[in-house]
Image (cartoon, coloured by chain):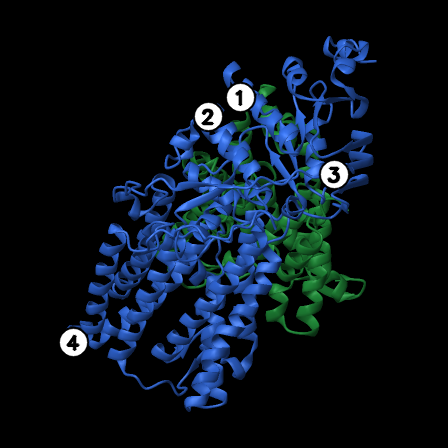
Amino acid sequence: MADRVHSSPKRGRLLTRHGTGLALLGLLTLALVLLGPLFLDRFTQNVLTRSMIYAMMAITVDLLWGYTGILTFGQSAFFGAGAYATALILTHVGGGAQNFALALVLSVILPMALAALVGWLSFYHKSTPLYASVISLVVPIVLSQAIFAGGSFTGSSSGLVGYPVMKLGAANYFRLAGVALILFAGLAWIIVRSDAGRVLIAIRDNPLRAAYLGIRTQRVQIILMTVLGGVAGLCGFLYANAGRIVAPEIAGFGFGTQMIVWTALGGRASIFGPALGAIGIDYLGAQLSGSMPYVWQLIIGVLFVVMILFMPRGLAGLLPRRQRTAAAPTLATLPDRPQESSKDALLSVTGLRKAYGNFVVLDGIELEVRPGELISVVGPNGAGKTTFLRCLSDGTETIQGTITLAGQNIAGRPPEDVVALGIGRKFQVASVFESMTVAECLRLARATHERPTLWNRASGIHLPSAALDILALTGLDKKLAEPVSGLSHGMRQSLELAMVVAMLPRLILLDEPTAGLTKAERTLIGEVLKRLTQELGYAAILIEHDLDFVKEISQRIVVLHQGRLVMDGPVEEVVNSELVRSIYSGMAHD
Amino acid sequence: MALLLDIATTAALLFIVSAGLFVIFGVLKIINFAHAAWLTIGAYTTVVATKMGLSPWLSLPLAVLVGGLLGAVTEIAIVRPLYRRSLDAILATWGLGVVIVQVITLTFGRDMQMPPALITGTVDVLGLPYSSYRLFLLVAAVIMALAFVLVLERTRLGLNAQAVIMNETLARALGINTSRVRLVTFMLGSAIAALAGVLLTPLSSVDPTMGISWLIGAFMLVMVSGTSVTALALACLCFGAAQVLVSTWISPILGSVTVAVLCAVMLRLHPKGFARG
C-alpha cells in the first residue's frame, strides 16, 4: 500500500524523567514487599496478601471503567471463576505439581472464555454503556447462583475448604502477591501511557468519533475484557491458594461492586489510586469491621456517594495534576493518496429511501460521485441532508435501495467497516477527543494505518501533505502539544478535518464545515477542499447552506428538498434555477 | 392449572416490583440502583406500622408517603447534580442503596422480620385451593397497569412525561418544566417501589438485603421493555412463565436467574426487546 511507511518513526524513550522516578518508587515498594514479612505479624501478612490481590482486581476495574468507560460490576465473576477452577481441581483431582499447573492454566483460560462471551454479549454496534453495565451485573449473579446450585461439587453456600494448596507459607504468599501487584501495576501504567492506551481513552471519551476513525471499538472492548478476565482469573488462582478457602461471595455481585468502590475512592483512571484504595479500604476494613461492621460499611457508602458527587477523580484528584511535559512530536510527510486514474463512479446511490415509521426522510435518491469531484448538497433545514450523510457512512441504517462504495455494497457494515472502504466523515459539530492534545488526536486518526504500540508513544506522526497543509494554514502545527479543550471553534473544525484527511479516505463527507467560522477561516477551508479534490483526486460531498461558498469551490450541486433529490447539475445552472430561488425564499412548500 | 395460576401471579409480582424502576427509567433514562433499597424501606414500613399496632393495610399509604419523600430528597441531592453523568448517577444511587441498607441494619438488626400479612388463607379456584394473597397481587398488578395508562394518557403530568420521554430538549423548549417532571417522576417511581415492598412482605423474607434478590430481574425487565407499559406487561408474562417453568422442573435456584439470562440474550439478539414488536 502506498501509505505504508518504511522507516518506522523514532520512538519516544520509555524512561522519561518522570518514569525514572516511578521506577525508583517501584524498586522501593519491591524492597518493602520482600522485606515486609520480617516486620509484620502473621495476621497482618495474611490480610495484606488478600488486599494486594484485591488491588490487582481494582486495577483491572480501573482499566475497564476509568480508562475505557466500561462500568463493570462483573470483574468478580472472572475472579470467582479462576478461584473456583483452582479449588475444584485441587479438591476433586488432588494436589501435585502437575495439578497446580493445570489449575493455573484453567484459572486463566476459563475466565477468559467467559469474559469473551460476556464481551460479545455486551459490545455490539449500537449497544449502550448502560446495557453493558447491566450485563456485567447479571454475570456474577448467574455464576454465584450456579455455584449455589452445584451441591457438593462446588460446596454450595459453604464453599470449598481444606483442599491441598501450594505450600509457600504466609510470608512467601505475601511476597508473591506483592511482586505480582507491582508487575501488573507497572505494566498497566506503561500501557495506559502508550499509544494503545490513547485508543482506550478515545473509546471512553468519544466512541462515535473513534468508530468513524476506523477503530473497531467493540473489538477493542471485547479483547480488553477478555485479557482482563484472564488477569482476574489469575488473581483468583492466587487467592484460592493463599486463602485456602473459596466461597460463593467472591464470584458475586457484592464483591464486584466493592471493586467499583475502591476504584472510585482511590481515583479512577490513575492506576495507583485504585490499587491504594483497595489496599487501604480492605486493610482498614479488616481492622475495624470486627468491632463495628455495619458502621464501617455505612461510612464507606457515604464516602462513596460524596466522592461520586463532588470528587469524581477520587482521592487521586487531591494530588496536583502533573504538568504535561511531553515535547511536541515531530510531523513527517506521507505521500498523498495517488490520483485515481479510473473515471468509474466511486460512490453510487440507487433508489435510496429512508423512513422512520410513516415519516419518510429520503426517497428515490440517485447519485454518482467520481474521484476528484466535489459535490455540494444544498437544501432547506429538514430536507434530509444530514440523514443522507449518515446513510452513506453507516451501512447498518435500515434503508431501501443500494449504496456502493468503491464497488462494494455497504449494506450491513458498521461505520468502522465503511471507513475501511474509504469514507471519512466530518461531523457538523466538531467531534474530537476533548481530553487529548492536538497531536494525540492526529495520531489516533492514523491508528488504523500505523498500529499503535502497547509499550510507548511514537515521537513522530506521519501525515499526508494535505493534512499538514491544514495544520500549517491554521497554525495548529504550533499547538501540537496543547489540549484540544483549549482550542477555538474554528481550530476544532480544522483539526477534525485534518484528522479525517489523515485517514487518507477516498471520499470525504463534510457536514457544514464552515458553520460558525470567520470569513478568513471559511476561505481557508475552501482552499483546502479545492486542493484536495481538484489536485489530489479526493472525492467530497459537502453539505452547505452558504450558496456563495458553494459557488466558489464545487463543480456540481445537488438539491435536496423534502427528502427528494430535485436537481443535480453544474453550479451555475443550479444556483440560477427558478427552483433553488424559490426553495431558498421559502415558496416551494407546495 | 396451579401452574397457570403460578405463572399469572408471578408475572403480576414481577410487574409490581419492576413498575417503580420502569417509571424512573422511562423519563430519566437512568437505572435507579437504589430501587432495592426502596423495596426494603417499603417492607420495613409495614414492620414499623404493625409494631405500632396499625393495620397492615395502613402501611400501603404510609409506604407511598415515605417512598415519595425519600425519592424527592434523592432526586434533588443526588440525581439532579449528576444529570450529565448518567453512569455516575447510577453509581451514586447504588451507593445510596448501600447506605440505606446499612442504616436499616443498624436500626433493626440483621434478623428476619415477620410482619402480619395483609390477607391470609386460600380460596378455591375451579376446585383448587390457591393462596388468596397471590390472587390479590394479580388484581393489584392489573390496577397498577391501568393506573399507568390513565395517568400517561389522561393527565397533564402524563402528557408532559410523554413529551420528556420522546424529546427532552424539545419539551424544555416548549416550556415544559422538565426538571419538575423529573422530580415528580422520581418521587412517583420511589413511592411505587416502596408500595411494592409492602406488597412483597408476605411472600419474601423481610431483612435488610431482601431487595437485592429482586433487583436484577427488575432491571432486565425494564431494559427489554423500554418505555411501553404493554411491553413491560408482556415481558413480565413471558419471562415470569419461563421462571416458573424452570423453577418447577429444573431448579428453583436457577429459576431465580432465568429472567435475567433470557432478557440479556434477547437484548443481544434483538436490541429493541419488546419495545417494538
Query: In this rendering, is residue A244 above or below A334?
Result: below
Q: Secondary structure at mark 3?
A: loop
Q: Chain of mark 1?
A: A
Are both tags, 1 and 3, on one chain? yes
- Determine the colour of chain A: blue
Type of amino acid at the residue the image marks with label 2: Thr
Q: Chain of mark 2?
A: A
- Comparing marks 4 and 2, which lies closer to the viewer? 2
Q: Earlier in the sequence, mark 2 or mark 3?
A: 3
| Residue extending furthest toward the left | A39
- CB atoms of marks 3 and 4 within 8 Å: no
In the image, the chain rendered in green is B
Horizontal side, residue A575 vs residue B208: left or right? right
User: Chain for mark 3?
Assistant: A
Residue at mark 2 to residue at mark 3: CA–CA distance = 30 Å
Query: In the rendered image, which residue does mark 3 sit on?
Result: A346
Residue A259 drawn at (x, y percent): 40, 58
The residue carrying mark 4 is: A38
Tag 1–tag 4 contact (CB < 8 Å): no
* Residue in the image at 22% along x and 55% along y: A21
Image x and y of residue B1, in percent = 79, 65
Rounded to the nearest angstrom, the CA distance separating label 4 from label 2 is 62 Å
In primary-sequence order, the first of circles 4 and 2 is 4
Label 2–label 1 contact, CB within 8 A = yes
* Secondary structure found at label 4: helix
